[in-house]
């Protein structure tokens, strides 16, 4: 009996799509309404931005590989626009390379799990209101078929 295992190379875009999909499904299960690919007021693009039942804003940065993490250091620039921030990575990602401060989600194309809770850092009321209104408008424009990506 042949017990050879064949490893299938998965491209970085495929990994990113699978982790994003699984993290979005997890956010929905946790009571959030996520949007993908949201450009923030500072021009940075959040992989997932989600609005909670009580108005809390959660940003998730997807990392498809160690190289992706090491070359993309702009994740700290997302924190002024959310109450909580986490990384989402695939099951094979070397998690010890990630900083300990943000939350940590491990996800695949079917769902995910929170391995480390994101530390809450509540937004100021005026910023929360502006972001929530922009998030709602962006979501409505997307439902209407407008290719909007930025919070205005």
Image (tube, rainbow, N blue to C red):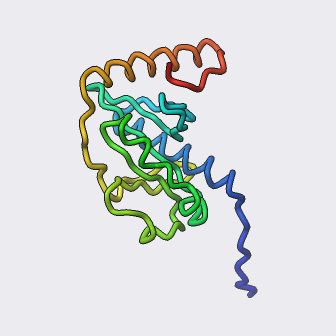
Find residue 141 and report its image quarter: top right
Residue for point 33% across, 62% down: 100
Viewer-proximal residue, 10 or 128? 128
Find residue 79 and report its image quarter: top left
Find residue 81 and report its image quarter: top left
Viewer-proximal residue, 52 or 98? 98
Residue for point 48% across, 33% down: 42
Residue for point 50% across, 49% down: 74
Coordinates of residue 115 in the picture (x, y in percent): 35, 59
Coordinates of residue 108 in the picture (x, y in percent): 54, 54
The correct choice, above or below, for 108 with respect to 5 in the image is above
Residue that lies at the very extreme toward the front in this rendered image: 42
Q: Is residue 46 left or right of residue 102?
A: right
Coordinates of residue 147 in the picture (x, y in percent): 66, 21
Coordinates of residue 69 in the picture (x, y in percent): 54, 60
Q: Is residue 126 left or right of residue 18?
A: left
The correct choice, above or below, for 67 with respect to 103 in the image is below
Quadrant (top left, top right, bottom left, bottom right) of the N terminus: bottom right
The correct choice, above or below, for 136 with respect to 109 in the image is above
């Amino acid at each position: 009996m042949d017990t050879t295992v064949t490893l299938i190379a998965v491209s970085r875009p495929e990994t990113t799509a699978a982790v994003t999909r699984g993290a979005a499904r997890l956010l929905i299960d946790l009571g959030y309404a996520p949007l993908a690919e949201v450009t923030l007021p500072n021009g940075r693009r959040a992989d997932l931005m989600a609005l909670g039942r009580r108005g809390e804003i959660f940003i998730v940065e997807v990392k498809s590989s160690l190289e992706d993490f090491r070359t993309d250091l702009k994740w700290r620039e997302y924190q002024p626009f959310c109450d909580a921030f986490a990384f989402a990575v695939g099951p094979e990602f070397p998690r010890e390379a990630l900083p300990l401060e943000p939350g940590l989600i491990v996800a695949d194309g079917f769902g995910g799990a929170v391995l480390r809770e994101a530390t809450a850092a509540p937004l100021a009321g005026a910023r929360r209101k502006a972001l929530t209104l922009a998030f709602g408008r962006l979501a409505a424009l997307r439902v209407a078929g407008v290719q909007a990506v930025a919070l205005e």
